[in-house]
């Protein structure tokens, strides 16, 4: 096994922008750099498998990432630990944390998204999982490129990700609630959210690659008697491509 990177995130925050708990994390530079090298290898390898046929994105390069890839570049244990920390943070906030309970979580699918000009992800959510997340690796400055005269001085959403929690959308001049959240990604930024949360990725024009790793995970909480308390009812036996690359022994 490759020696695993142990540098913790430089920032870890879990909060409610609306109903569900949302995690916003900043990865340490060595973790981010290892993920960039890993995805460089996957993108350059002509044998890498496309995952695009299973995804909503209008994006050419969406390539599968395996647990063995994460392990090879020393990031597997760190990422699994961060996902579990998200589960524990949420359990504590919902007063479902007891020191004798068992908190399990596992990434069960992951893929590189290498997005270029005019590519985008329509509004969608993720299935077959409890948690979804994104790790941003390359984020070109795409703002202000369109030069639309009538929009001068206004912010644009090119290259952003928007989450939609309420059909009311953005309630202007309302201090009580907002139904949408838009974020401008930066390298090293990692976000996690419940898999049912609708989100969309905006297109951009011009040069540059917007690269990220998207992933899904499952979790399960049981008490000291192994009675189910929350999470995945399938006892985490949720098999996907992630744990077994073609030609490899199952991990």
Image: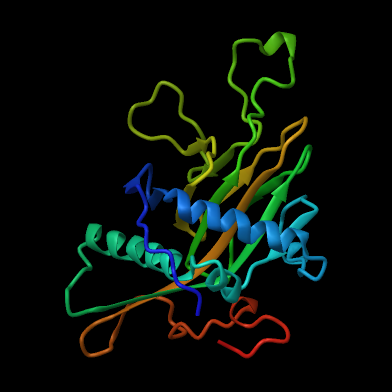
Q: Which residue is at the far left? A: 99
Taking the spot 23% from the left edge, 82% from the top edge, the residue there is: 223
Taking the spot 80% from the left edge, 53% from the top edge, the residue there is: 60
The quarter of the displayed image where residue 64 is located: bottom right
Relative to the observer, which residue lies in front, 135 or 161? 135
Vertical order, 149 against 208 (above or below)? above
Relative to the observer, which residue lies in front, 202 or 249? 249
Residue 141 percent location from the top left of the image: 63, 29
Quadrant in which the C terminus is drawn: bottom right
Taking the spot 42% from the left edge, 50% from the top edge, the residue there is: 28
Residue 238 percent location from the top left of the image: 54, 81
Residue 244 percent location from the top left of the image: 63, 83
Relative to the observer, which residue lies in front, 240 or 124? 240
> 96 left or right of 23?
left
Vertical order, 112 against 203 (above or below)? below
Relative to the observer, which residue lies in front, 86 or 140? 140
Q: Which residue is at the far front? A: 3
Q: Is residue 176 visible?
A: yes
> 35 left or right of 53?
left
């Amino acid at each position: 096994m490759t020696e695993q990177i142990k540098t913790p995130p430089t920032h870890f925050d879990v909060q409610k922008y609306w109903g569900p708990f949302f995690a916003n994390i900043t990865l340490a530079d060595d973790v981010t750099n290892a993920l960039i090298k890993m995805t460089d290898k996957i993108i350059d390898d002509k044998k890498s498998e496309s995952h695009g046929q299973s995804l909503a994105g209008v994006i050419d390069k969406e390539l599968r990432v395996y647990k063995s890839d994460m392990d090879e570049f020393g990031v597997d244990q760190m990422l699994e630990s961060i996902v579990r920390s998200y589960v524990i943070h949420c359990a504590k906030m919902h007063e479902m944390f007891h020191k004798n309970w068992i908190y399990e979580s596992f990434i069960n699918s992951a893929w590189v998204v290498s997005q270029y000009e005019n590519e985008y992800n329509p509004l969608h959510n993720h299935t077959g999982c409890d948690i979804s997340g994104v790790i941003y690796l390359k984020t070109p400055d795409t703002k202000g490129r369109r030069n639309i005269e009538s929009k001068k001085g206004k912010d644009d959403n090119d290259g952003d990700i928007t989450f939609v929690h309420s059909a009311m959308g953005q309630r202007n001049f309302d201090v009580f609630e907002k139904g949408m959240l838009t974020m401008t990604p930066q390298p090293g930024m990692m976000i996690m959210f419940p898999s049912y949360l609708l989100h969309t990725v905006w297109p951009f024009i011009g040069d540059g690659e917007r690269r990220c790793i998207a992933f899904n995970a499952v979790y399960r909480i049981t008490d000291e008697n192994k009675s189910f308390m929350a999470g995945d009812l399938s006892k985490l036996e949720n098999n996907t491509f992630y744990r077994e690359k073609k030609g490899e022994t199952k991990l």
